[in-house]
Amino acid sequence: MLTRRKLSALTLITVVLALSACIPKTIQTPQGRAAYSALEVLTRIDELQNATIAGNQQGVIPDATAITIVKFTVASAKTLKAAPDGWKATVTAGWTATKAALPAADAQRLRPYLDAVDLVLGLIGGRP
């Protein structure tokens, strides 16, 4: 179970990692920028999936919540890989629906990871 101190540390680490989603100035081409953005979103979504699965294995995250999140992460990964420059609307809509479907207690347990996905989508332009 996550304590407040661990949760605060995870939140700080997650925010720092999410801020790294800003596209480096060395990536100049539109295709490179699109691929970098898609990779950053995929990374945050993967972190959410890993945390969800770990929480489910520990009995902290119920199966129904884990299934909802994993379905979103798998669909998003397919979209991001298939259309690195056209994923924003689809992934953002899926993210909005997924967050709305989460029970409040489970969302609180996963807050740092949810916030990281929100942040990276906001930084890259797909408002959550």
Image (cartoon, rainbow, N blue to C red):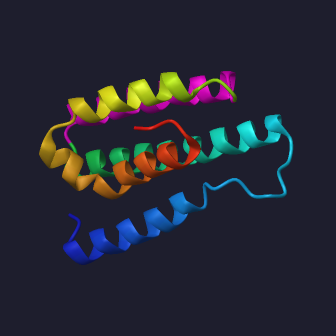
The residue drawn where x is 56% and y is 30% is: 77
Q: Between residue 8 and residue 61, name the one nearer to us.
A: 8
Which quadrant would the C terminus be assigned to in this image? top left
In this view, the residue farthest toward the bottom is 5
Q: Is the stretch drawn in magenta largely helix, strand or loop?
A: helix
Q: x and y percent of residue 95 in the render?
A: 39, 32
**88 left or right, relative to 12:** right
Q: x and y percent of residue 118 in the render?
A: 41, 46
The residue drawn where x is 48% and y is 45% is: 122
Res 60 visible: no
Residue 30 forms part of the magenta stretch = no
Which quadrant would the N terminus be assigned to in this image? bottom left
Res 105 visible: yes
The residue drawn where x is 35% and y is 34% is: 69
Question: Which span is picked out in magenta?
Answer: 62-84
Q: x and y percent of residue 101 in the render?
A: 22, 29
